Image (cartoon, rainbow, N blue to C red):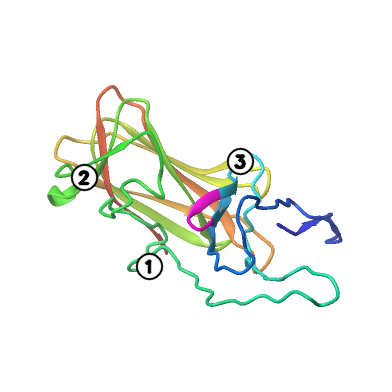
Amino acid sequence: MIHGHVDSKGVFQRNLATHIAEGYEHVGQWVTHGVLWTPTSIKHYINGDLIKEYTNKHQIYAPNHFLNVFLGAYGSEGGVNMEVDYIRAYNWPLKDGNELPNPDFEGTAGLAPWEGEATVDAGSGEKGSQAVVLEPGQKIEQYVYLDPQQDFKLMYWGKGDQVRADVDDVTAVTGELSNLKTLVTDQTKKGGKHELNFLTDREIHPNKKIVRIAFTNIGKEKAFLDNITLKKK
């Protein structure tokens, strides 16, 4: 059950969404539940099986503030009890102040959590490391939570054809995009570093801003990207 739909004055209206998991027996046996939370989606798993997901980027149900998970059992006349063995939470690892997971495409997940049709190639990145390969017209993007009213610097290494980098503010729930900054770079065959500075918009405290980082190959040949970093200035 996803709660939290309120009006402009903050008065609760209704639940955002409710679903009932069927086909899994909970009585008398252990069941593992999992929730994957990203800036644009919530996915619910039982015993490793994906049973329900909310991934519509034009109807974003993932909160841009804290996520509260609660457990309960329904029964008549107090005749139901529930045992819980553990509750664990994991964050995608970030390094050296970089706000972007998997910035160098060296992780075992390949492109994830970046999205797009691009591929990852060994030996094509900066200093011979792995890099993402964008064919003409292809794009990769990643949605992230950032502090509001904060100066950020986006830096990346690129090689090959012309690439457009876009930083967009994302409106909560509707997913509407508003461009904060765009940079078009003419890459070289040897490769080089580029940077783009931007300021995030306002948000109600302590909520985060949802921001989309996107790279598009607008040239006619392959383009390579590596070591994408997003840091506070």
Q: Quadrant of residue 72?
A: bottom right
Residue annotated with mark 2: 192
Q: Residue at x 15, y 35 (%)?
A: 189
Give the residue type at disc 1.
Answer: Gly
In which quadrant of the rendered image does the C terminus lie? Answer: bottom left
Please tell me which of labels 2 and 3 falls first in the chain: 3
Tell me how far mark 2 sits from mark 3, CA to CA: 36 Å
Residue annotated with mark 3: 56
Q: Position of residue 113 (x, y in %)?
A: 41, 50
Give the residue type at disc 3.
Answer: Asn
Which mark is drawn over residue 193? none
Left or right of residue 14: residue 86? left
| Mark 3 residue element | loop
Tell me how far mark 1 sits from mark 2, CA to CA: 22 Å
- In this view of the protein, which residue sits in the foreground, 31 or 131? 31
| Mark 2 residue element | strand
Few, some or many C-alpha atoms within 10 Å of disc 2 (few <14, some 14-19, many ≥20)?
Answer: some
| Magenta span includes 27 | no
Give the residue type at disc 2.
Answer: Gly
Residue annotated with mark 1: 97
From this view, report whether residue 17 is shown above or below residue 87.
Answer: above
In which quadrant of the rendered image does the N terminus lie? Answer: bottom right
Q: Quadrant of residue 94?
A: bottom left
**Highlighted magenta segment, given as a residue range:** 46-50
Q: Position of residue 125 (x, y in %)?
A: 19, 46
